[in-house]
Image (cartoon, rainbow, N blue to C red):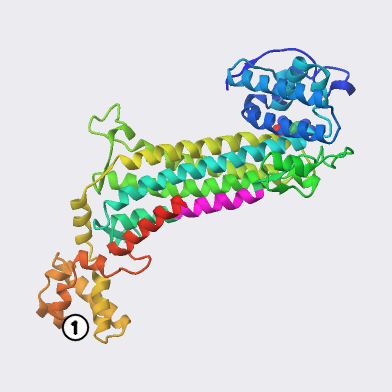
Amino acid sequence: MSKKYKNSAQESWSGRFNEPVDELVKRYTASVGFDYQLAEYDIKGSIAHAEMLATQQIISDEELLAIKQGLAQIKSEIQNGDFNWSLDYEDVHLNIEYRLTELIGDAGKKLHTARSRNDQVATDIRLYVRDQIDITVGLIHQFQTNLLNLAELHTSTVMPGLTHLQVAQPISFAHHLMAYFEMTKRDVERLQDINKRVNQLPLGSGALAGTTFNIDRLHVAKALGFNGVCENSLDAVSDRDFAIEFCMAAALLMTHLSRFSEELILWMSPQFNYIEIADRFCTGSSMMPQKKNPDVPELVRGKTGRINGHVVALLTLMKGQPLAYNKDNQEDKEPLFDTAQTVRDTLLVFADMLNGISVNKDAMYAATAKGFATATDLADHLVRKGLPFREAHEVVAKAVNLASQKNCDISALSIKELQLICPLIDNKMIGLLSLEKALESRNHIGGTGSKSVKIAISTAREWIES
Ligand code: ARG
C-alpha cells in the first residue's frame, strides 16, 4: 500500500482541548507512518463490529449498509494507492474513520459506538499476527521440502560429524541436514501453539472496562474467525504477550537458521571445501578478484541479532506498564512488523538457496577419513569381546596415539602393533572399521544409518503434508 500525506482538520478527540497539538508532538505521537500496514485488518474488524451493532439494534440496517459500502471504497482506495494518509489523524484507525465520515456522513461517526481504539488496535494486531503465523508456517514447509530434496540425494554421503568442531564420528550429510528439519519442525509446532493464545478477540473491552451497550462479543469473534474472546477487558487492551511470543518463536527460528548459515559459511570456505553455493546467492569483492562471499548466510546470521533485539525491545516495552492501555504500546508495531518481514524474507531466500547447493563428496569423505572417526566403533567391538567400555576406551586411545605419531589411520596400523596394545583386537575387527560400515551400523531410530535416515525423510514428508 502506498502512502500520501495531507495536512488538515481537527483531531477526533480534540473536544476538551484549547489549542492544537504542537507540530513536533504530532509527528512524535503519530503511528500512521507504520501502522497503515494494519489497514486491511482494521477494516475487517470494523465490518464485524458494525454488523454486530446492527444485529443488536445499536445502529440501523441503513447505517450498516452505508458503513460497509464506505469501508469497501476505502479498502480499494488503499489498495490502489489513492488513500490520503494524514498525520493529522494520527494512526490507521482515525485515518480510516475520518475518511469514512467524509464519504458517508453521520453513519461513519456511529461506527465507533461501543468501541475504543484500545480494543480496536489489539484486535488488529491479533489478526495480523494470526496471518503472519500462517504465512511463516507455509514458508517453513517450503524450506523443509527443499531441505528434504537435498537430504534425499545424500543418505550415503559420508561427512565428519563434529563435536567441539573436532572430528567425532562419521555421519551422512543427509543426517546432518535432517537435524535442521527437526529444529524447524519444532518451530512450526511452537508457532501453532502460540496461535491458540493469539486467536482470542479483544473487541468489546472498550477503552479498558467494557461498554454500557448490549454488545454480542461472541458474534464478532465468530465473524472474525477467533476461537474465543479475551476474558478480561483490562488484560485484553493492555497485554502484548501474544506478539512477544511470536517474536520469541521467530528468534528461535532465526537462531536455527543462523546455526545452519554458520555451517554453510564454513563448508563453503576453501579450508573445508565441502559445498558450493550457486553464484546467484553470493557476491564478489571489489578489491580481491578471487573472492566469492557467502553473503546470504552471513546476512541470515546477522539478521538473527536484529530479531533478538526486537524481542528485548518488546519485553522492555511491557515490563513497566501499569494496567491498562498506555501509549507505550504503540511502540509494539515496528519491532513486530520488522520481525515478521525479516523472517519471511529469510525463509524465502534460504529455501531457494538450498536448491543452489552442490556437494563435494570427496572432500567430505577425505575429511572424515583423517580424523580417527571410527575410534568409538573399535571400542564398541572390544566391548562385544567382553572388555568393559572404560577399558576399551583407553585401549583405542592408545591406538589413536600410535596412529597419529605414525601419521596414519588406525586401520593402517599392523595387526601386530594393535595386538601389542590389546590382544583382543583381531583382523576382522579392523576390517569392520570403514566409514561406510560405521554409518550402516547405526540404523536405529534417530541414527545416521541410511535406512534410518530414509525413513526419517519419508516421515518428514508425511508430516509436512498432514
Ligand atoms: N495508535 C495507537 C496504538 O498503536 C492506537 C490506540 C490509541 N489509544 C489511545 N488511547 N490513544 O496503540
Q: Is residue 205 above or below residue 67?
A: below
User: How many residues crowd around disc 1 within 10 Å: few (fewer than 14), some, or many (20 or more)?
Assistant: some
- Secondary structure mostly seen in the magenta stretch: helix
- The answer to whether residue 4 is left or right of residue 21 is left
Q: Is residue 90 visible from the viewing direction of this image?
A: no
Label count reads 1
96 or 239: which is nearer to us?
96
Magenta-highlighted residues: 183-197
* Magenta-span inclusion, residue 88: no
Picture coordinates of residue 173 (x, y %)?
29, 55
- The answer to whether residue 56 is left or right of residue 343 is right
* Magenta-span inclusion, residue 188: yes
Q: Quadrant of residue 389?
A: bottom left
Q: Residue at x 21, y 51 (%)?
A: 361
Q: Callout 1, which amino acid?
A: Cys
Mark 1 = which residue?
422
Q: Secondary structure at mark 1?
A: loop
Q: Farthest bottom residue?
A: 386
Picture coordinates of residue 455 (x, y %)?
34, 61
- The answer to whether residue 385 is left or right of residue 111 is left
Q: Is residue 102 above or below residue 13?
A: above
Picture coordinates of residue 319 (x, y %)?
70, 47
Q: Residue at x 67, y 25 (%)?
A: 32
Q: Quadrant of residue 130?
A: top right
Q: Residue at x 60, y 38 (%)?
A: 336
Image quadrant, ligand 1: top right
Q: Is residue 60 above or below residue 102?
A: below
Q: Is residue 14 visible from the viewing direction of this image?
A: yes
- The answer to whether residue 392 is left or right of residue 362 is right
